[in-house]
Amino acid sequence: MTEAILLVGGQGTRLRPVTVNTPKPMVPAAGVPFLAHQIARAAAAGVDHIVMATCYLAEVFEPYFGDGSAFGVTLEYVVEDQPLGTGGAIRHAAEHLTCGADEPVLVFNGDILTGLDIRGLVDSHQQAGADVTLHLTRVDDPRAFGLVPTDADGRVTAFTEKPQTPEEIVTDQINAGCYVFKRSVIDTIPSGRPVSVERETFPALLASGARLHGKVEQGYWLDLGTPEAFIQASADLVRGIVDSPAVPGERGEALVLAGAQVAEGAKLADGTVVGAGARIGAGAVVQGSVVLDGAVVAEDAYVHESLVGAGATIGPRTALHGAVIGDGARVGADNELRAGARVWCEAELPDAALRFSSDR
Ligand code: GDD
Ligand code: MG
């Protein structure tokens, strides 16, 4: 049996970046709450007990995920009174693990989508006899991540979270937010106070001579830190560019959920999902976007790489490019919203109120 801790709290899953009412881990990506993909992927890799470490009320998750049996896992919720940081959350959640001191425990950041071979990471951890094994990936700009240089044998030589100076950028290998810990190593993290696994635990382990092993795997990997990334993740799941057993229905250019109405002549493409009870009008074009439950995209509207919140309305001929429309908002006809536009939940934008122009 393999146990895992899923980190779902702190800043990483804050509501703010997506102006919808639902907490970010529960915003649907490809038709189901984002976390369902992480849970389903872990289950498919043989994980059978998951402890969800959160600062949210368990009521946010329990109605959907319950005891995990629908996913073939036993799911427990551990709620921190105050955010304990990544390391503190791991330590706190570990009280619910049942495995022995030498056994591997998977830890996942809750805001990434990855095609990682999870089983392969555990095997590599066992083979290396490591204390901790980290999944590493390579990115063009590593500044927003944890930098993890390794030697020729894959041994981690340093861990620098969010480098501040150019001199600190010694590698393009970053912490991809999935670890295998030897259980006994988790028990060395101090309890009862906030601890950052990236800033405190990993550097301390390295200083003490512990064996940290880095496994570079360059498959699909996306950090969902921005709404744009979230929209991309949903589209990639719908199209099967990254695999998740939790996507309902067939992979393809669009996923239309039960009770949605798509008018004849509307065009759905590039991994668009249309939520339950949503309506897409005739002549509308929706590309690479997330249209949540009960939303309305009126006739001849153009929605491109955008998120339309639950129950929101997009008026006729309105164009959205890289916009996020909050739940229940009403965007009138003949508007144009471009990259970065965020319409708050329940807000109303009149007809012909906004357009973009390159006029000088
Ligand atoms: N339960 C709990 N309590 N979870 C937390 C807490 C906390 O106090 N703080 C953070 N988390 C969870 C977040 O929900 C997220 O899933 C994960 O831990 C990482 O925290 P973020 O706040 O998202 O960190 P980040 O994105 O800036 O950086 C992390 O992820 C990068 C990869 O996406 C670091 O692990 C980096 O080293 C890494 O490169
Ligand atoms: Mg994050």
Image (cartoon, helix red, strand yellow):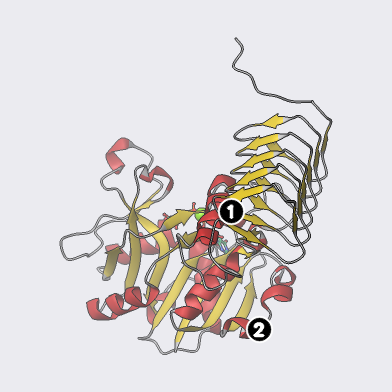
Marked residue nearer the N-terminal end (1 or 2): 1
Q: Residue at x 76, y 29 (%)?
A: 334
Q: Residue farthest to the front?
A: 264
Name the kind of residue labelled 2 in the image. Answer: Asp
In the rendered view, tell whether residue 193 sits above or below residue 98.
above
Name the kind of residue labelled 1 in the image. Answer: Gln
Q: Is residue 206 visible?
A: yes
* Quadrant of the image containing the N terminus: bottom left
In the rendered view, tell whether residue 200 sits above or below residue 62.
above
Which is more toward the observer, 327 or 206?
327
Labels in figure, total: 2
Please tell me whether mark 2 sits on a helix, a strand or a loop: loop
Q: Residue at x 77, y 64 (%)?
A: 259
Quickly name the residue at label 1: 11
Quickly name the residue at label 2: 67
Q: Residue at x 75, y 60 (%)?
A: 260
* Quadrant of the image containing the C terminus: top right
Q: CA distance from mark 1 to mark 2?
A: 25 Å
Whole-percent x and y of residue 285? 65, 43
Which is more toward the observer, 272 or 77?
272
Whole-percent x and y of residue 349? 81, 33
Occupied quadrant, residue 117: bottom left
Whole-percent x and y of residue 63? 74, 75
Which is more toward the observer, 213 or 274?
274
Under 8 Å from ligand 1: the CB of mark 1? Answer: yes
Whole-percent x and y of residue 347? 82, 40
Please tell me whether mark 1 sits on a helix, a strand or a loop: helix
Q: Point out the frontmost of discs 1 and 2.
A: 2
Labels 1 and 2 touching (C-beta < 8 A): no
Q: Is residue 18 visible?
A: no
Occupied quadrant, residue 131: bottom left
Which is more toward the observer, 78 or 260?
260
